[in-house]
Image: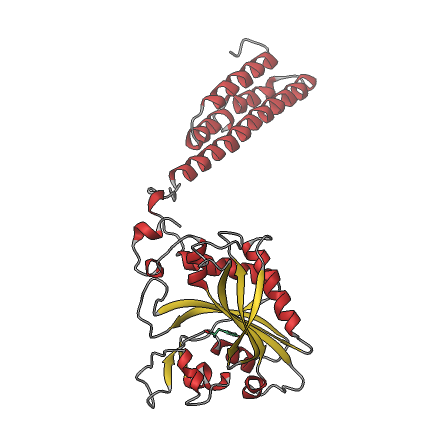
């Protein structure tokens, strides 16, 4: 090799270095090659030793050529180093990959039909500006009845067949028979204006049949502010009806009685199956009953310390289960709660 002129030898050295560098498979091999190509015993260092025997001008040119060759070899090695490092990193990521995909997608769970309905109702009301509140299922007589203008032995208490809990004085603790006690809790906790819905589970001592279950779900609504009128109630329920059931569905209010509202009304919607003509689902009436509503009774405001002269409001409450059952053509409410997976999987 030393017979050839220096520049040619250097070019050959760089060319073979390029091949060797490209052929390395990992960082260890590259490091070894680096020592061989640029270390103390390398040809590059050896070539420098020859400089001493050259004339000054030749020596400067040769020195420069050696430095340039060294630089090119170092650049080659550096480029390969970052390539190999990236490959190794990628290989490690692959090796540590965790497969988190479900093996049996058919066995994933789903929300219960009633939960889906509750979520949908919440979405619609939240879209109308309502907030969502919750209260306990085990209640006291005060919240479930007394504060709702149902003093002890009020005849209307018979509207709700109550499960009592064996805690404290007899008849003082019960499973809430409706979501209306949450109205009281919300008003106790906040000042008006209030615009809330209160969904949840309720209990009644009913014998289960196709249209009754001892456990079911309601959604309560409460709006309190200055100057709230019956027209606000009707307008809100009508807007809700269209948003939840569709633009073609109409709502109506019929006079009724509830101790906690005055005046009170029943809230019906035009039958979603026959469009109001009359069919089996609506018993030929063209209307489906959803629940009760009315203007909050002044005694209810008094019970929570609101001034009935200043505040007015409306409330409503309707059953979620029956409505969902109607919507999906489920003709026996008990199917919702016997937890037969073959039934539940349909929704
Ligand atoms: N709590 C009543 C029930 O379960 C339903 C109801 C009627 C709720 C009128 C209300 C209301 O908020 O204003 O039968």
Q: Position of residue 330 (x, y in %)?
A: 38, 54
Q: Position of residue 21 (x, y in %)?
A: 49, 23
Residue lying at 53% horizontally and 25% vertically, measured from the top left: 45
Residue lying at 40% horizontally and 81% vertically, measured from the top left: 158
Q: Position of residue 195 (x, y in %)?
A: 60, 71
Its colouring scheme is secondary structure
Residue lying at 30% horizontally and 52% vertically, measured from the top left: 341
Q: Outermost residue, top direction? A: 3
Q: Quadrant of residue 90?
A: top left
Foreground residue among 310 and 292: 292
Above or below, 291 relative to 36: below
Foreground residue among 331 and 277: 277
Q: Position of residue 83 (x, y in %)?
A: 51, 30
Foreground residue among 335 and 79: 335
Describe residue 40's horizontal placement relative to residue 72 as left or right. left
Foreground residue among 197 and 82: 197
Residue lying at 48% horizontally and 31% vertically, measured from the top left: 84
Q: How many marks?
A: 0
Above or below, 200 relative to 117: below
Describe residue 206's horizontal placement relative to residue 271 as left or right. left
Describe residue 120's horizontal placement relative to residue 157 as left or right. right
Above or below, 343 relative to 164: above
């Amino acid at each position: 090799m030393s017979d050839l002129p220096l520049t040619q030898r250097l070019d050959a050295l760089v060319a073979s270095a390029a091949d060797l560098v490209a052929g390395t498979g990992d960082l260890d091999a590259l490091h070894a090659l680096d020592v061989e190509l640029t270390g103390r015993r390398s040809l590059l260092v050896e070539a420098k030793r020859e400089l001493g025997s050259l004339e000054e001008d030749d020596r400067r040119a040769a020195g420069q050529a050696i430095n340039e060759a060294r630089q090119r070899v170092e650049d080659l090695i550096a480029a390969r180093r970052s390539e190999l490092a990236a490959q190794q990193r990628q290989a490690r990521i692959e090796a540590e990959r965790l497969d988190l995909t479900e093996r049996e997608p058919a066995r994933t769970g789903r929300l219960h039909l009633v939960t889906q309905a509750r979520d949908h109702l919440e979405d619609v009301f939240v879209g109308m500006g309502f907030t969502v509140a919750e209260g306990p299922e085990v209640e006291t007589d005060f919240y479930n009845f007394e504060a709702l203008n149902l003093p002890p032995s009020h005849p209307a208490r018979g509207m709700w067949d109550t499960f009592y809990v064996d805690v404290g004085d007899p008849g003082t603790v019960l499973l809430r028979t409706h979501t209306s006690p949450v109205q009281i809790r919300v008003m106790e906790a906040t000042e008006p204006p209030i615009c809330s819905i209160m969904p949840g589970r309720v209990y009644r001592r009913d014998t289960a049949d196709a249209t009754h279950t001892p456990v079911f779900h309601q959604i309560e609504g409460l709006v309190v502010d200055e100057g709230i009128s019956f027209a606000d109630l009707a307008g809100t329920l009508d807007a809700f009806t269209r948003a939840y059931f569709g633009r073609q569905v109409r709502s109506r209010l019929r006079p009724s009685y509830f101790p906690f509202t005055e005046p009170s009304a029943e809230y019906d919607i035009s039958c979603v199956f026959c469009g109001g003509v009359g069919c089996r689902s609506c018993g030929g009436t063209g209307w489906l009953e959803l629940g009760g509503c009315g203007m909050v009774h002044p005694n209810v405001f008094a019970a929570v310390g609101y001034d009935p002269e200043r505040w007015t409001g409306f409330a409503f409450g309707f059953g979620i289960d029956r409505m969902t059952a109607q919507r999906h053509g489920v003709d026996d409410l008990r199917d919702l709660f016997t937890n037969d997976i073959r039934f539940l999987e349909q929704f």
